[in-house]
Image: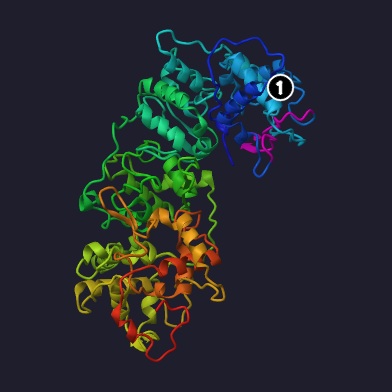
Amino acid sequence: MNITWSLLAALGTSFVLAHHVHAAPSAPSTANNDATLIERGKYIAQLGDCIACHTAKNGKPMAGGLELKTPMGTIYSTNITPDVDAGIGKYTFEQFDRAMRKGVAADGHNLYPAMPYPSYGKLTEEDMRALYAYLMGGVQPVRQANKSSEMHFPFNQRWGLSLWNWVFLDTTPFKANPQKDAVWNRGAYLAQGLGHCGSCHTPRGFAFQEKAMDDAGSNGQLYLAGETVEGWRALSLRNLWTVPDTVRLLKTGQNRFATVSGNMADVIHHSTQHFSDSDLTAIATYLKSLPPGKDDLPMPAAPVAPAPAEAAIPGDLFTTRGGLGYAQFCVDCHRRDGAGVKEMFPTLAANPSITSANPATLLHITLTGWKTAETAAYPRVYTMPGFARLSDREIAEILTFVRANWGNKASPVTPEQVKKARAELDPKITDTSKFETPRLADMLSAANAQQLVRGMRLHLETKDLLPNNVANSLNCTSCHLNAGTVADGSPFVGVSAFFPSYAPRAGRVINLEERINGCFRRSMNGKPLPVDSDDMKAMVAYFDWMKGQTKPEDKVAGRGVGKVDPAIKPNVENGKQVYTKQCAVCHGDDGQGLKRDDGTLVFPPLWGDQSFNIGAGMARTYTAAAFVKRNMPIGFHEKFPLGQGGLSDQEAVDVSEYFSHQPRPDFPDKVKDWPKDKKPVDARY
């Protein structure tokens, strides 16, 4: 990845924490064999996230080789295993200590400040010896040669680093503030020293030095005041939330206000979730004590509570391009009210990544994607795919909408800002589907825009808008994802071009209105919509807009739900296990769906009185399996636009056989189905 020189100190070196701040004892003569010391050193190294920088992708732990690209060239992280030839096995403690505090290797050459030794100078000798003991006695030696750096001239002249050290390096050990208590001093020690929070969160100077190494002195107000790191906005940590909220974020990757993103997700996974509760409290206490910076937004005392039903839905959700873009691409996870899904997808109200004056993080997430931190508290990782498929204008419209609603009052995002971020990040589009995703925002330019938007909303909000026709908790978009715009998610693209057409289940030619009413009766356990009603006309108009230039003889890429081999034999017991592991988090342990604390339904039930009765595609095991394979679960990986799909064919068949045969309302008219044609062998009835 491309990073600037000023960010080298931030990469992979987030929190390396010492365990105690005491006076340093004399060197123990049996350090490498002292099990207690090694165990304590392991704690330090684990919390320090050493493995992140010193382990290449798919490489052996601590063996180095991670590529770090900069505008001045490329360097590679080094082998810090105790191998005597390739690693640091020959380092004496004094040599190790000098490298950590002064950035000078055993052979005398200067280290690049990819390792934040300016912060390590604050470390106590006791903690340094524990770390040394662990690296020498608790890590498996790996004989893997270090790679030579590939820095351009003059940056390949390491002697210049001696001058940089002479000007900027301060190796004065941490000094406790006698006016503060032990908890505050512990937090300050961890944040300023091996914690090196400032490597990412403190502004840089003309020579890429941190403008402040602690909160004291004339530049103390700049310490942890925020910086842009590798295309992410490392937010100001000053006056951060409440102490319990900060503790929760560092422990789990999320709190009431935010969910971590970017490299911080890895920091949480490898590092901060392993902190002792007392260390987390100390850090949070210290950060909370720092006066806010001059450009800091006020820290909310409590998250914005979801407003009742319609009141929480922005008035311009369906009347602006940004609102319709949000409705199409964001609502499934972040919901119409922007409240997200608890412990899955973050709220957008008062979210610091949303409200930051600098939208770098928001742009980074939108273009390249996002994932939750994997922690003991939340072991399942949820993913948001990148939206680089969208144009600069579309992304700017959606982000401007998000930054201006649910109490957010941030400045608009411009297409030029998106274009610049796209050029810097060079996001890759990994989905090669030929499906052309319709843009709901384009409906506004149609002559019958109002009718089209109504038709779309009838698919998105079917239960709310047509309560007399829907007798369960489903909406059309429960099956036709993103209002019928997702490839292999039974999209509406081109559908109306194929009607009227022969329907084997009916044994005759049916029109589009009859097909729509079939869903109301079979899937929603409800009543048909009058064919001459304005709402039916709006639904048909929406289908016709989706048709575009499609002709009856055309093959539409992504139409339908695909296929699964019917030779696969279902294993219901495995299907139950797959459901428990992959589906229950959204659809409930007993298929009841997922609700908020106030009873608002988030994700639909898969069986029971409020689920589909016969269903359309769900009436057949292998059609249901094809849908599940390509569309469930969501937030599972990087597939555009929902991170959808990911189960194997066998898993999809097994889980579909399991949930589709659970108890649900009956459909008496099923006895009239397939009057002329042979009933499919996988029909559920």
The magenta segment: 60-84
| Residue drawn at (59%, 18%) of the image | 127
Q: Secondary structure at mark 1?
A: helix
**In which quadrant of the rendered image does the C terminus lie?**
bottom left
| Residue drawn at (34%, 64%) of the image | 477
Position in image of residue 182 (x %, y %): 44, 14
Three-letter residue code for mark 1: Asn
Position in image of residue 205 (x %, y %): 51, 23
**In which quadrant of the rendered image does the N terminus lie?**
top right
Q: What's the colour scheme? A: rainbow
Q: Is residue 76 magenta?
A: yes
Position in image of residue 439 (x %, y %): 38, 62
* Side of 364 where 171 appears, left or right: right
Farthest residue toward the top? 178
Q: Check disc 1 and report the residue beneath it.
A: 33
* Side of 237 where 531 appears, left or right: left
Position in image of residue 235 (x %, y %): 42, 32
